[in-house]
Image: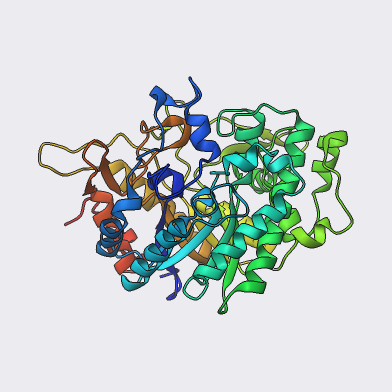
Amino acid sequence: MAFPRDFTWGAAAAAYQVEGAAFEDGKGPSTWDMFCRKPGTVWEGQNGDVACDHYHRYAEDVAIMRQIGLQGYRLSIAWARVLPEGAGRVNPRGLEFYDRLVDALLAANIQPYVTLFHWDYPYELYCRGGWLNPDSPEWFADYTRVIVDKLSDRVTHWMTLNEPQCFIGTGHSLGIHAPGDKLGLKEVLRAGHHALLAHGRAVQTIRACTKQPCKVGYAPVGVVRLPASDSPEDIAAARAATFAVSDRTTWNSTWWMDPVLLGQYPEDGLRQYGADAPSVGPQDMAIIHQPLDFFGCNLYNGELVRANAQGQPEPASYPLGGPLTAFHWTVTPEVLYWGPKWFWERYRLPIMITENGMANTDWIMLDGRVHDPQRIDFLRRYLLQLERAIAEGASVQSYFQWSIMDNFEWAEGYKQRFGLVFVDYPTQQRVLKDSAYWYREVIATNGEALHRDAYAPA
């Protein structure tokens, strides 16, 4: 078996998507609370006010995680739950929730993997300029200090930012996620530069304040291009395209990875963005480029690329009628082979797959169970490709399935279901799907169950 003996099998969720209690116990508003109240932004006007009510039901949810056999749970902290205005005053009741959650996880022998920012920026700081404000890295460092002071006696795995490509690009350029802005590219990249500085200042703060040895990482999107064939030319073209900044959007890997992991913006990105590239201060890269212990990466699918007559990458099409998830994302298991393989080769940092999963159309069937064979097949295909990457030398430490339970899927509201556990939102009943029982076997066998043909649990 290729999976290391100390491989961590987990699942993930994010604060705004599961916690609910959006205005309880002293929590301040976030940009997602703001965004959901703007007409026409979220499917059917839905919001995260209640979500999965995890704030009140965390003990039940941890018991379900234990039943599945999770070894790790990737959670995020709601910044405005702890600092209602984003800076200054600390809300002790908000801190106490995460204190209780961490204790419950550890009592269930589940390691907490804490993400400091998963998109729910404090509203009051947004009103002061948000990520555009040059003080935002210090705001984030001060918030990080509060969390680390409280939890680092028990938490040993930290992630700074989740998917800056998304919260900067979809939130500040396209305007389809919170805060819903449509800024010019220069301002978008300036906000992104401040977010990268916030990452670096957070890493410095964690290192300075932790109460025990810990591991620190980062969780961008892995924007991966896949070869259209097994030819050396197509493979080389796909690899080159994976590490290229090929348009004037935020949707790429290296603009967000190279500064953090190599200490510089990529040259092709500087050329592509030109005068819109951010101003970089003399100490900025020294702050951004902090030593990390692992490279987190969210991987769902990839775009197909082939080599043209000159050997340069060009887009290729998937076969007509190919598999799609309920999100209409292409099903591309090879992204968990090429992605880890190429990221390991470029950055030489142990990899954590911090998100991977699929949206499905699940419901409770007449027998009282939730049968989701598509998800089982999806995960099996993807994990077999991850095993292949590990067997060929990629250093991969862990895998976190997205998501532990159905939840608020941002602008899609509750339309999409990504969970191993079905949530009936009107009653908050939880039902383990077939995929949860299947994943339990994968965990118990450290991946050996992936090689069994049966798709449904016994």
Instruction: Report the residue that reaches farthest toward the top.
Output: 40
The reply to whether residue 48 is in sight is yes
Quadrant of the snapshot with the C terminus: bottom left
- Estimate the x, y position of residue 172 in percent, counting from the top left: 65, 33
Q: Nearer the viewer, residue 280 or 329?
A: 280
Horizontal placement of 391 versus 87: left or right? left
Rendered view: 122 above or below 102: above
Q: Is residue 88 left or right of residue 453?
A: right
Vertical side of 307 occupied by 431: above or below: below
Residue 403 placement (x, y as % from top left): 39, 49
Quarter location, residue 90: bottom right
Q: Could you tell whether 46 is left or right of 252 in the image?
A: left
Residue extending furthest toward the bottom: 212
Residue 175 placement (x, y as % from top left): 61, 28
Q: Report the residue at 75% width, 32% height from top.
A: 248
Task: Name the foreground residue: 454 vs 40.
Answer: 40
- The residue lying at 83 percent from left, 39 percent from top is 277
x and y percent of residue 87 in the render?
A: 62, 52
